[in-house]
Amino acid sequence: MSELDKTLLDTNSDTNRPITISVDAMGGDNAPECVFKAIKICLKEFKDIKFKIFGNRKKIDELLDSYRDIKEKCEIIHSEEEIADDEKPSVALRKGRRSSMYMAINAVKNGEADAIVSSGNTGALMAISKILLQTLPGIDRPAIGGIMPSEKDYCVMLDLGANIHCDAENLFEFAVMGSAFARIVLGKENPSVGLLNVGAERNKGHEVLRTALNLIEESDININLYGYVEGDDIHRGTVDVTVTDGFTGNVALKTAEGTSKLYTNILKRCVGKSLFGMLGSVIASPAFLKAKKIMNPKNYNGAMLLGLNGIVIKSHGSTDKYGFANAIKVAHKLVKQNINDQITREMISSGHVPPRNGFEEEVVE
Amino acid sequence: MSELDKTLLDTNSDTNRPITISVDAMGGDNAPECVFKAIKICLKEFKDIKFKIFGNRKKIDELLDSYRDIKEKCEIIHSEEEIADDEKPSVALRKGRRSSMYMAINAVKNGEADAIVSSGNTGALMAISKILLQTLPGIDRPAIGGIMPSEKDYCVMLDLGANIHCDAENLFEFAVMGSAFARIVLGKENPSVGLLNVGAERNKGHEVLRTALNLIEESDININLYGYVEGDDIHRGTVDVTVTDGFTGNVALKTAEGTSKLYTNILKRCVGKSLFGMLGSVIASPAFLKAKKIMNPKNYNGAMLLGLNGIVIKSHGSTDKYGFANAIKVAHKLVKQNINDQITREMISSGHVPPRNGFEEEVVE
């Protein structure tokens, strides 16, 4: 194995060493306090974790006095600038090295952290991550992969909005990356993968989808391909991973969020209209709250910007401490099980990354 | 006004005459009995309606004995063939004139019926309708328009799956057709229209969307344009009409159906797990059933194949008598208020249909 291949595959291979998570403390609606509350939750669960927190030291120091118990696990690094939620990626990029987001991602690039978590501006996070971390070998475009509830339990969907236009090769890469994500985050040994389409028959949909289907079928890749799935298959749990372009994926994700929110509100409204409705809902309230929680997308917090040469986790901007803690836990899992190593191995074994001296044989062994 | 223009606009203008609905009695899971149950419901509400029912006479006659009270309003026309739900449109077309669906659409073409309603195969319904009825002046491609629940009340979405690829002109036409549909079916005087995208900013999304936005803004068309909307705006009720291509629309519709079904099932499961849950749900059951009903897509039955030179209504294949009755009511409303006349007027006034002798002035007046 060449030195380069070793570098590609062996980073983070010592899974017993403590994990360092870099946090952009200035992104999202509830920043920075939400970050410390979340860290407190995580430190109760994991002993092998520490944090590098990037943000405005003045704001952070004021807060940190109330979180003395987590202080020793947190290193605070001052940043001059913050990236606003509605800032264009180009403007965010101009702020350069001074923003908390840039500095937090840079810590991953420099090997000072194993993953970065941010509730900030998604476009800026992707743009800065692409520049600083670049993509994994064989990956043309990174994609946003997230988790949704399903009839069976959970499923993974990607791309949730990074790439408006995708070709068949991109969808092939998404299938590889989505499978690795589902193996680690959902614990599925051999996750099934479906391509999102408007019908199950082979002749349905765009040409890009038909080419992607052939590409996966004809390759030696270790993908458990189901075939095409439709919109209602996502929540039915027909497959573990739904692959689609970033336009369709973003519309599907947001439509699901909107439907779920409407159902909750309609339920409240119907129940509130009668005495029996109100009485019944009070008696059954723990059950309703549980159903609402399962259907609330914030509880599946922790989408990954897949395909980058570093683990970058995007948290919902409006998440609470539990949601942010979940995003940290996702990061922890992905570092421990070295997702990028898995993706790189698959891409090399599929022949989509040019083989190097003696490498292919070793992977096959 | 030329004779041609008069023909385009004056069909069905006598809204006091009785309306004839042509029904394909052999399509859908519950055919043909569901059709007669639905007709019974409709005849209680409308006196000015009669039916031409196309289907296998033997099957129908057996049933009709139990529906003597509706017999005088129904003319039965025997058809030799039925189109299966999974039949390819090309195969359905080969069955030609012998199928109940073809004959029912043909009745509209011949002026023997004002609208056709079918629960059958959507692809076949669109293919046969396009051939027999052709499109309205200025309309390049028909689209499927349907209704969805929203925070405000209801909204219209199109295209729900007829056209995988759409250009900006197609989306422009969908905006015109969707506005007319919302005016009549939702009773909105000046329905707002949004183009489905992955963000609200002008530079977001596909080039096709940006061109369509400019096209609508720069035309003299009577469209209340909101701008771009996102997936969660559909159910939020941000606009009355959501315009998108048939691929995205189909995925969004089915994702919403899947989410809604999952929410209902998760709710049942959570409630069933505890004694209090079960007790509360029994007490509040009328309220829950109402919420479930509002969120059930079958209750918005009656999508229209918009843009055809005739009113074609597609009912859900698995609908029940209430759903099918609703599809008939939608047809009744659209005939009474002459939707195709409205669409044609708009298309001519927008300049997207070449003006003819002295016509443009008359429309403006």
Image (tube, coloured by chain):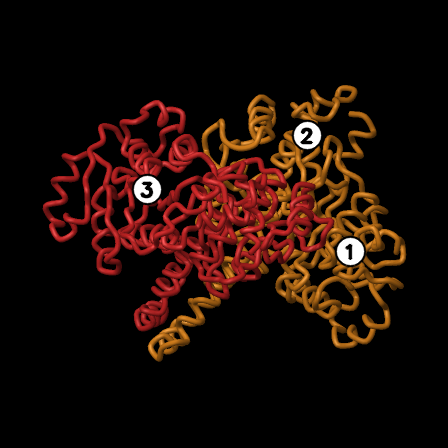
Chain colours: A orange, B red
**Circle 3: residue type:** Ser
Q: Which residue is mark 1?
A: A22
Which amino acid type is shown beneath numbered disc 1? Ser
Residue A345 in picture, x, y percent from top left: 68, 31
Q: Position of residue A221 (x, y in %)?
A: 60, 27
Q: Are marks 3 and 1 on the same chain?
A: no
Element on which disc 3 rests = strand
The chain carrying label 2 is: A
Task: In the rendered view, tell whether residue B145 sits above or below residue A203.
Answer: below
Q: Nearer the viewer, mark 2 or mark 3?
A: 3
Mark 1 closeness class: few <14, some 14–19, many ≥20 residues within 10 Å? many
Label 3 vs label 1, nearer the camera: 3
Is residue A198 at all visible to an observer of this figure? yes
Q: Is residue A341 left or right of residue B353?
A: right
Q: Residue at image x 19%, y 46%?
A: B74
Q: Residues within 10 Å of mark 3 (few under 14, many from 20)?
A: many
Chain containing the residue with disc 3: B
Residue at numbered disc 2: A347
Q: Is residue B277 above or below residue B148?
A: below
> What amino acid type should be assigned to the residue bearing mark 2?
Met
Label 1 marks a residue whose chain is A
Q: Which residue is mark 3?
A: B118
Q: Residue at x 20, y 45 (%)?
A: B33
**Residue at (45, 46) in percent of width and height:** B9
For this orientation, the residue located farthest to the bottom is A275
